Image (cartoon, coloured by chain):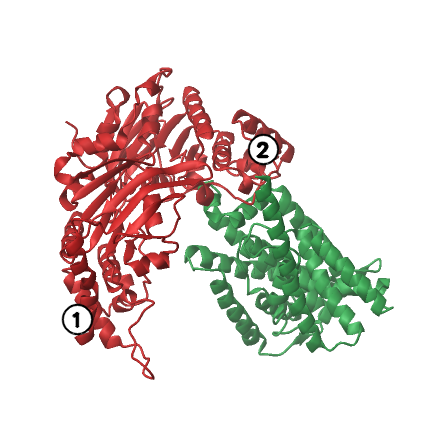
Chain colours: A red, B green
Amino acid sequence: MNRNTKVMEKSNWPRTAQLATQEREPLLRMENITKSFSGVTVLDDVSFEVRPGEVHALIGENGAGKSTLMKIVTGAYQADCGQVFWNGRPVEIKTPHQAHDLGINIVHQELMLVPQLSIGENVFLGRHPVGRGFSRWVRWGDINEQASSLLKGLGHPLDPKRPVGELSIAEQQLVEIARALAFSAELIIMDEPTSPLSEHETKRLFQAISQLKERGVSIVYISHRLKEIHQVADRVTVLRDGRHIVTRSIQEITTDNLVRYMVGREISEQFSGKKVREAGEEALRVEGLTASGKFSDISFRVRQGEIVGLAGLVGAGRTELVETLFGAGEAESGKVYLEGQLVRIKTPMDAVRHRLALVADDRKAKGLVLGGSVRFNIALAAPRKYARYRIFLNSSREKEVAGQLARELRLKISSVEQQVMYLSGGGQQKVVLAKWLSADSKVFILDEPTRGIDVGSKVEIYDLIRRLAESGVAILLVSSELEEILHLADRILVMHRGRISGELPRERASEELIMQLATGGAVH
Amino acid sequence: MRRFGPLLGLLVTSAILSFLSPYFLTFDNLINVFRQSSVNALLALGQLLVIITAGIDLSVGSILGLSCVLVAMMLKAGVPWPVCIAAAIAIGATLGMSNGLLLTKLRLPHPFIPTLGMMNVARGLAFVISGGFPVSELPDGFRFWGAGTIAYIPVPVILVVAVYALFHVFLTRTTVGRDVYAIGGNKQAAMFSGIPVDRRLTMVYALSGGLAALGAIVLAGRLNSGFPLAGDGAELDAIAAVIIGGASFFGGVGTVWGTLIGALIMGVLRNGLTLLSVSPNWQKVVIGVVIVAAVWIDVLRQRTTRKRGLARK
């Protein structure tokens, strides 16, 4: 018990100091932070501060710079320019370890716990309290007692001897928070903490957050869910395209305003220069597709020559949905029709046979054999097509087709025998597209097709998607970039927490409306 | 370089040995080396297929042992030798296929597990079935496959060259061979490209088992006996040959001819060291060093190509 209070004292110690200086000095102040990666500016002159004991929400679209900014705070990245102040003193945070020592902790989206170890061991991982002198044994009694009291302090008593692997995600989050407290955290960064949680679990997390506030711990709360931000945050900062847009007290700002700040840019001009395509026969129809825990009751259809956008936040279940459609996941119920025929797609092989194509979200993991040549990869999905008697490879024909596709897609390579590994992100994505083109696919499912791709290739890929649609291919486009979806799609479906929360025809769609549907708000 | 590295190694080793022993570079001795390497070469070929898929097959030595005993007992029971050979290969392939099915259907975490299990099961059965005794005095028609010659060339050598040529075509010129490389290069991408990954893996392990049984036929024929301890530890020699031959444990890389050269390098070393009256114990030490050195050279080479690749970018 004695040791226990010691820990409490330790984490309370800075609080007194902070309270006295609260009005004058924020806990963390970042001034004029600029960061670029290989010539692309990710953060441009961003300033950001967190006061002691406040919950400060940090929001913005994907790619706005939130993660980069937080990685600078936690020492994973170094800023190119700008200054960080901690408790008023200028600091240079060069390593995650240093950030830890200052009292900065992050609760990651993917939790960083050892599932085989107990709650107590995880809380004190790497710094078990030990005796002095010759009795340097691990003191299990102390560990368990302290872990249990930290969790109780968060409002959630858990048996510290249970292995972490048995816990729900929500409980594991709490263990991570307790771990941060055991390290005397003064600032905890939570990256999308509620995306894997149910509503009830979310409520419990918010209770824990208010406990943390009472202790004087500050929180940076990153989330896409605007409703939650109003429940939990004191202040909010919006980033957009690497720039600081606004910081306000949460009472002074409405959800609609937040969406406007997040989206911000002029989008009207992008609707120009669009040919109106005539959508043809129905190509793909999905009815009531359900996979519990991932998505439920999904119904929609895509016609030949039509581009249907599938918008939503990260974690809404879009990738799970399209991979299940492609046979890489299991659905419990629901039907899929291709050209009006009921089909059963149980493996990607079935999908390819039905001339479905999936450009997966992670091209390096799911799309390419990186050590293979451009030709090898382009022929991957349809080697039989070029083979003699369907068995013997016909490399000259493969070379011809690969070369032709490479030229068509303006792929910058010296030869089709070049390894895919050394191509740029855009080049690699073009190879994935070429693979499906060479397989004569009729329905293309594109999952984040331009993620991490330079602007030049992006434009070329947009162009290709449009040409594909014009040639009568049906396209389902999953994208977290609203601009991209609005730019390309004829119709937009929006997913929220595993369900389709709305459908918008192009004429009516706007970034604001999509964001409202994606964050669980109703469309007025 | 990747293509010619192992060949260079073989030539250098042979050159050194021919200086050290005048007998090394004679036709009789070289043919002898090849003949002695033939069983390892057959096992290594199966192992190569498995290693290209980023797997490993620890059971080939034991499958060889069990097939060896079974084929000898069938011959003794009066079954005609062509039937025995066909049956032995079928049994080996079936055992190999069960490795593949265990891996893909039970979703065991790594091929190490099912093949380690099979290694013990097959070896145990070999002893159970034979009662622990060798089965000797096999018919001549059968012995021809291990001990016969055609125009001075031992039949096992001809067999190895023929089987290797066949598998070279299979791996480099057919769609299924292409799938094998794709699975080893990136299993998930192969799956997402519509390749029937599980079916191909099962086939690869079946082929490995079948080739082990072929090795058993050659060995039993040459020694005129089937004995339960045959092929003890042979899986490790096979793996060594594949790795010396330039295949990568990470999968997706490896050639049939590289593997043959790998098997020959091991044969040449054993033969040369024996000619120089180096004890078998020291031979093991040398082979161990060669395995590590071969892979290390490969690592160095890859590091330089990667640098060059990045520089190009």
Marks 1, 2: nearer the viewer: 1
User: Type of residue at label 1?
Assistant: Thr
Precedes in sequence: disc 1 or disc 2: 1
* Vertical arrangement, residue A53 with respect to residue B192, above or below: below
Q: Is residue A479 left or right of residue B101?
A: left
Give B51 or A384, whichever is nearer the viewer. B51
Quarter assignment of residue A229: top left
**Location of residue A384 with respect to B271 vertically, above or below:** above
Q: Residue at x 17, y 75 (%)?
A: A2
Mark 2 neighbour class, 10 Å CA radius: few under 14, some 14 to 19, many 20 or more? some
Residue annotated with mark 2? A413
Per the rendering, the mark at residue A425 is none
Q: Percent from the top left, x then y, of residue B27?
A: 85, 62
The label on residue A5 is 1
Q: Chain of mark 2?
A: A
Q: How far across and how far down the image is residue A219, in percent?
A: 22, 51
Q: Chain of mark 1?
A: A
